[in-house]
Amino acid sequence: QQNIFFIVFLGVLTGVGGGMIRDVIANQVPMIFRENIYALPCIIGGILYVYLQSVISHNLALFISVIFIVLIRIISEQRKLNLPRIEY
């Protein structure tokens, strides 16, 4: 039995945390705090991985999930796609 929440949570934490460390070392405001799609592709990619792992091999599921996340991030950066902002 897999804990799906734990798998997805660790994937998001790794993706977001690594990016934050990179930006802090580069003396920049972390991307997660700026306007762009950052954590959402990690969440969707983690869910995709959990689903694909039950259908195909672990390595192929991992490869497809990583490619999906990278493509979504590249497309969102090129097209300047952002999540909607909550106005107070």
Image (cartoon, rainbow, N blue to C red):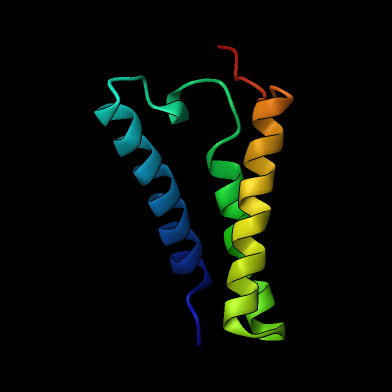
The one of 83 and 27 positioned closer to us in this rendering: 27
Q: How many marks?
A: 0
Residue at 66 percent of width and 84 percent of height:
54
Toward the viewer: 31 or 70?
A: 70
Tell me which residue sits at (64%, 85%) in the image: 57
Q: Position of residue 70 (x, y in %)?
A: 61, 48
> Can residue 22 be spotted in the picture?
yes
Near-viewer residue (6 or 52): 52
Residue placed furthest toward the top: 88
Q: Is residue 76 above or below residue 43?
A: above
Closer-to-camera residue (57/32): 57
Q: Quadrant of residue 65?
A: bottom right
Quadrant in the picture for residue 19:
top left
Q: Residue at x 45, y 27 (%)?
A: 31
Q: Position of residue 24 (x, y in %)?
A: 28, 28
Q: Is residue 83 something one can see in this rendering?
A: no
**Whole-percent x, y for residue 27 in the image:** 27, 20
Quadrant of image for the C terminus: top right
